[in-house]
Image (tube, rainbow, N blue to C red):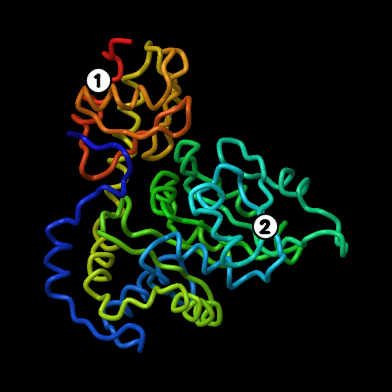
Amino acid sequence: MPDFRSDTVTKPTPEMRRAMAEAEVGDDVFGEDPTVNRLQEVAAWRVRKEAGLFFPTGTMANQVAIKCCTEPGDEILLERRSHIMNYELAAFAVISGVQARAVEGERGIIRVPALARELRPKSYLFSGPSLICLEDTTNMTGGTCYPLAVLREIRAFATENGIPVHLDGARLFNAAVAQKVEAFEIAREADSVMISLSKGLAAPAGSVLCGTVDFIEKARKWRKLLGGGMRQSGVLAAAGLVGLQTMVDRLAEDHENARVLAAGLAGTRFRCEVPETNIVIVDVRETGRSSDQIAVLLEKAGIRCVAADTARIRLVTHCDVDRAAAEQAAQALAGLKL
């Protein structure tokens, strides 16, 4: 059954499995796992940051980045539909003791005027903003990409106001491939960046947080506190290295398959924007059914997806669903008896 629920359902490639089996390992908490060290170096180089730190998940990496940049009682600015805001269990409040100020974006993309409206005057009455969190690509607004010009404007605004920028780059390489730029051209507009290895790059687990040497040393402490010291984690890092080396360029195929899927819904009761990357958000309101109901019907028709909210479903293309599967998904949706 073609599974479009997420690009996290990808299976490791045969090359990854071989690399995992043969990985040279050591105790990473002592900094002695050579495969983890190599992954961290390669990931940091790909985004042109000084250092990297391997994490079991992107959520943990995001939360450690927030912890490193804030004090309890501070405020973080982020897009209202972003992953950190909605899908990390308000961990920023639990772990860092900060509150979030949600900013309205355009299809998930924050622009400087919206940020400026949410920047409150400096006063003992207000919680001061100490971090801006961006997401590229956007998750629940259809895999949209930040234009480089917009990122530069945000960076200038943040610098002017003395606020660091963290980039949730879970799908950073999708954004880079879609815009035909290198990942570092996007990442250089942020102080820290998290990249996921377990989505389009198809590794079984893991993310890397990148930033300055001092930032990463601070992050190492908080990773340990949260239980992220994984000892002989080179068996996972080996797959991540293969992902960075072999799976980036092929993301363009996922983007094309997403466009094929979306095009197949033309003239139906399902509405969706032309996808920029590998996420297709489909509005189902014209069917008179909820997104959960459509997802159940679609699974009965042989396609797996998830509800994005009550009115939309989300389908994500990846290396384990080919063009034929994308066409099958569009045909299954168009053929639902409602």
Residue 311: % across, % down: 48, 25
The N terminus: image quadrant: top left
Amino acid carrying label 2: it is Gln
Amino acid carrying label 1: it is Ala
- Residue ID for mark 1: 332
Name the residue nearer the viewer: 180 or 31.
31
Up the image or down, 122 lies above or below 306; here it is: below
User: Helix or strand or loop: what does disc 1 sit on?
Assistant: helix
Mark 1 neighbour class, 10 Å CA radius: few under 14, some 14 to 19, many 20 or more: some
Report the side of 204 relative to 315 (left or right): left
Residue 181: % across, % down: 44, 52
Q: Residue at the location (73% across, 61% down)?
A: 129
The disc placed on residue 307 is none
Name the residue nearer the viewer: 84 or 201.
84
The C terminus: image quadrant: top left
- Residue ID for mark 2: 99
Name the residue nearer the viewer: 239 or 188.
239
Q: CA distance from mark 2 to mark 1?
A: 43 Å
Q: Residue at the location (26% across, 26% down)?
A: 329
